[in-house]
Amino acid sequence: MSITLDSKLEAKLRERAGAEGLSLDAYVERLVRADQAPVEEIEELALEGLNSGEPIEPSPGYWEEKHRSLEARWKAKRA
């Protein structure tokens, strides 16, 4: 595949790649893989959640309790 880059951007990418001992191709490939990793992680977590057990019917009370629980955890981390 061939990608055309602005000459200034290409120069920056070549400089960063060289600083890490990589070719420009290898550096860009690593950037793309790093960009894809969070998407793959979210997909894996979603599938894990779907397969984690019997489904539940969340009521308004369920969501209120979830909100209280998450807020308590968030406040505990900030303390």
Image (cartoon, rainbow, N blue to C red):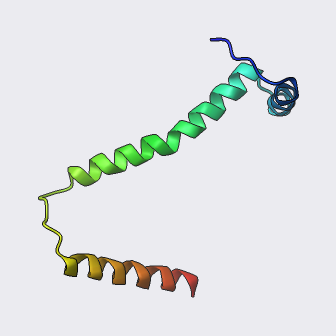
Left or right for 54, reference 47: left
Residue drawn at x 20%, y 50% is: 51
Left or right for 34, reference 59: right
Classify residue 69 by image quadrant.
bottom left
Left or right for 18, reference 1: right
Q: Quadrant of the N terminus?
A: top right
Residue drawn at x 67%, y 12% is: 2
Classify 60 as above or below 49.
below
Classify 8 as above or below 45.
above
Q: Residue furthest bottom?
A: 79
Number of marks present in the image shown? 0
Classify 23 as above or below 64.
above
Classify 25 as above or below 27.
above
> Which x, y percent locates residue 64?
28, 81
Residue drawn at x 13%, y 67% is: 57
Residue drawn at x 57%, y 83% is: 78
> Which x, y percent locates residue 30?
64, 31
Q: Quadrant of the C terminus?
A: bottom right
